[in-house]
Amino acid sequence: MSTIIENFKAHYGKAPVAVSKAPGRLEILGNHTDYNEGFVLSAAVSQSTEFAIAPAQGSVCRLIDFRGNSKAEFDLNNIDHPTPRDWSNYIKGVIVQLRKRGIEIGAFDGAILSTVPLSAGMSSSAALEVSACFAFKELFGIELPKAEWARVGQGVENQYMGLQSGLLDQFSSIFGHENALILSDFRKNEVLRTISMPSDYILVVANSMVKHNLVDSEYNTRRIDCEQAAAKIKAVEPGVTTLRDVPSAMLEKHRSLLTEREYRRASHVVGEDERVFQGIEFLEKGDIQDFGRLLFESHESSIRNFENSCPELDYLVELAKSIPGCVGARLSGGGFGGISIHLVEKAAADEYCKRLATGFKTQTGKEPELIRCSIGEGASSHKL
Ligand code: GLA
């Protein structure tokens, strides 16, 4: 983190007191299952957001983002509500969430340096929230369990930004394991285990270049559909609280209770929970082809059932089926634009990326952003 420390000194004329680092994340399988208390296979990536911090006098906090050289400033006495189109909302939101937990922080000067692509589906906002959380933890000596820090970040999205997202993004950023996928249970809010990835495959992220802005999207209405479907099934199956409790046989049995749309939304979530466990079995048997097939199935279900794909994402996944070297691909994250992930043989990756870029450009006229992702470690922080 030497660059951010040097940039901080040059900008503020003083040294930072603590630094933190929080990665972006990739959802591998388990789409829209987190807020249905289900299961997700995810990974932290090596792209991360760094946060350097020093105390300041008074109540005004200054921030600089070195990626775009964009500055922000706010008064701690005036942060109850977000301001429109302001990236510092994610940091103000963290302070507001801490206050709700009875924790007050003092004024600070902060700097950010991030390599997580913005608005793409790799959770740049969660990386920013978690990096701020961990910087505050160091500077102000705040002790909270790790899962509670994830809830602080989720609280920013839910209560400050108005997006009813689950815990996946912050959770993966905090609990990620180098070179392994994590299996999270979002009823217990626990990482159940890690699963290693075959070393001769890599994850290529292909950005559809369709701006994915979940706050403006249909994310919240998808969540309502899922909750309504669960409530209708619960009326006849008292053991059911959320879609996590509904196996596909039970969903079929009660299909007539649901509207056609609720049924399709629920089928996606129930199918995703099942694919997570099938996927783990395949990975453990070393059966990468079948694991890849589940990624394709997941995407198909996004198209037909959850309707959270878009033509550009569908092109990328169609291309994946026709270019040698790829065993599976799907949209990853909220959807409605953003990224697709492609599981590709390492030896074929160069040629694969070239052909994917050419094919996508021919069909859409746009250059896709392609990122080879290594699986990184979860968030960390230290005093200097
Ligand atoms: C976004 C949300 C997550 C999760 C995914 C879909 O990334 O922030 O909580 O719901 O979409 O799986």
Image (cartoon, rainbow, N blue to C red):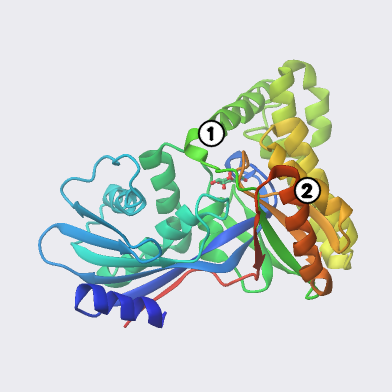
Mark before the other along the chain sequence, 1 or 2:
1
Relative side of 209 to 162, left or right: right
Disc 2 residue type (three-letter): Val
Q: Can residue 245 be seen in this view?
A: yes
The answer to the question of whether label 1 and label 2 lie on touching residues, with beta carbons closer than 8 A, is no
The residue pinned by badge 2 equals 317
Give the percent coordinates (x, y) of residue 268.
Answer: 74, 36
Count the numbered circles shown: 2
Give the percent coordinates (x, y) of residue 195.
Answer: 73, 67
Q: Can residue 164 be seen in this view?
A: no
Numbered badge on residue 217: 1
Check the image and report above or below for 97 versus 35: below
- Say which quarter of the image contains residue 376: bottom right
Label 1, ligand 1: CB separation under 8 Å? no
Given residues 95 and 309, the one toward you in this image is 309
Q: Residue at horizontal 74%, vertical 50%?
A: 360
Relative side of 309 to 254, left or right: left
Q: Nearer the viewer, mark 1 or mark 2?
A: 2
Q: Residue at horizontal 74%, vertical 68%?
A: 202
Image quadrant where one finds the C terminus: bottom left
Disc 1 residue type (three-letter): Ser
